Image: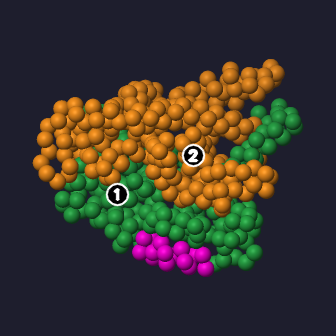
Amino acid sequence: MNRTVDRGTLTIAYVVLGLGALVALLPLALMLVSALKTSAEIVANPLALPQIPQWQNFLRAWKDAELGTSLLNSVKVTGLTVVLICVTGSMAAHALTRQRARGSRWISVYFLATTTLPIQLYLFPLYFGFAKLNLVDSVVATSLIYTAIYSPFSIFLLRTYFLAIPVEVEEAALMDGAKPWQVFSFITLPLVSPGVLTVAVIAGLNTWNEFLISTTFLQARTAQTAVVRFYMLGGQYSSDWGEIMAAALIIVAPMVVFFLLMQRRFIEGMASGSVKG
Amino acid sequence: MWFLFPALLINVLIILIPALLTVAMAFVTWDGVSDPTFAGLDNFRAIFADQVFFSALLNNLKWTAIFLTIPIIMGLVAASLLLIVRRGRTFFQIVYFLPAIIATVVTARVWQGMIYNPDTGLVGWLRIFGLHLDDPLAHPSTALFAVASVDLWHWWGFLTVIFFAALRQVDVSQIEAARLDGARYFQLMHYILLPAIRPTIGLMMIMTVIWSFLAFDFVYILTQGGPAFSSEVLSTLSYRYAFYNFTVGPAAAVALVISLFGLVATVFYIRVQQREVQS
């Protein structure tokens, strides 16, 4: 369509798109620049570059937000959730596409419906139940909640991958005497590994960033995730924005790097109907 | 079929059973310690007697109206312009998508400190142009819109990428033909592009309605529903009833009301999805 677009239209298009990029990048640029400034510099002019980069903002942020502990907690919760979702999600997606039994349509509808429920509809009994069972502050219990919340989207995404594999591939293996779980693990799963990777990336991103569940279920200082510790940091030392932005940068950096490396997986995964943060 | 079992078991234990308990909780009085007693519709009467409930409901409706229009228009404009340009498409898509992957708490704090704060943010910096603005989060008349703006920033780029992916599927010869016939941008949008991606726009609008009633993070982090409950939405109200006032019954009742709005949109959503699966 480019051939018929005149220069004027093209210029306007680039100006508007450029403005959009500015809107998207300005807050992130402010975060980056402020992370290296003193409080006085930020007050003087939020847009100016730092005189001398204040690297100690990062040290203070690391200490005050206890990022050593909290980042490790985030890694644990995220890692466990990703493993649980990939395993249970791919099994369920396989069952729903290949081992179609009666009622599987209704199970799909059920999974779809749970993605649209407010967390508040199950949060309170879940919290009191977990408190009774001493499961508050437990990484495993919290990962199970994330698995429940994020697995429906994973199942639907993986379903499309399973549908793309010819049934004959699996049938041939079954004819040769392989057991169903062998066919699933050694033949089907490797074929859908791009889908599993997409699911892992999106589930990982969502878990890493999630706030409501983690602030409710991981309350002890030693159990809090980085995002929750960061939230507390803003409440405690709300005047030291240099430090807060440094902590923000540390938390956001792994996801941004991941995103730049694997944009297609991110976009594909989030477009396939994941949860809005 | 046992392959379904682990995922289904986790889902039922974490979501279905607690959800059914919440439905039951909406009809009992319980302080979290002593035995619950049946209360009929008392919890619903309690929330309907609370003025904040109606202002929160109204805020959810305003939120829905904002998100059904502004980000969808921004997304459609940006996506259609991406179709016109050829160079830089990937760059713009990456940049637009970036806000969607930043944690909500981080996004909220960046806006709070570096944009809205009258001492340290851009709002304060405007004083060098003689504009003396106060923190928009601190005023009842602007708080909700200030919070919604943050969510807008976080959201519109995602829509752009979705709409662009849909627009790319539109038959190029159709677009070429329209342009040769002298169609201008608005005519092209109106007659070719928008009708072609109607299913995507429709789906995103249904999801917008569902998500607008679930909105929680930005409100909770930025204003806690304040000042004077002016930015309270149903989900933060429900959370406050349960964990601040320790009144689980009303919290459950509010959660049911949210679900009711979600349910209507969900039925719609499932029907659309099934139609897409079949086609």
Residue type (three-letter) at the residue carrying disc 1: Thr
**Image location of residue A247, percent across then percent down:** 54, 69
Q: Residue at x 73, y 72 (%)?
A: A50
Q: Is residue A151 magenta?
A: no
Residue B274 is left or right of residue B42, and the answer is right
Q: Which mark is residue B221?
A: none
Q: Is residue A104 above or below residue A242?
A: above
Please tell me if label 2 and label 1 are on a single chain.
no
Q: Name the residue: 40% across, 62% down.
A: A78
Is disc 2 surrounded by few (<14), some (14 to 19) or many (20+) residues within 10 Å?
some
Q: Main secondary structure of the magenta part?
A: helix
The one of B246 and A61 positioned closer to us in this rendering: B246
Specify whether A24 is left or right of B130. Answer: left
Label 2: which secondary element: loop
Image coordinates of residue B180 in percent, x first then y, are: 81, 23
- Dot label at residue B139: 2
In the rendered structure, the colour chosen for chain B is orange
- Callout 1: SS: helix
B197 lies above or below A87 = above
Residue B240 visible in the snapshot: yes
Marks 2, 1: nearer the viewer: 2
To which residue does mark 1 refer? Answer: A216
Q: Which chain is green?
A: A
Q: Residues within 10 Å of mark 1 (few under 14, many from 20)?
A: some
For mark 2, name the chain: B
Residue A148 position within the rendered picture, expressed as x and y whole percent measured from the top left: 32, 50
The CA distance from mark 2 to mark 1 is 28 Å
Kind of residue indicated by mark 2:
His
Instruction: Give, as a single range, the part of the protein colored magenta.
Output: A56-71
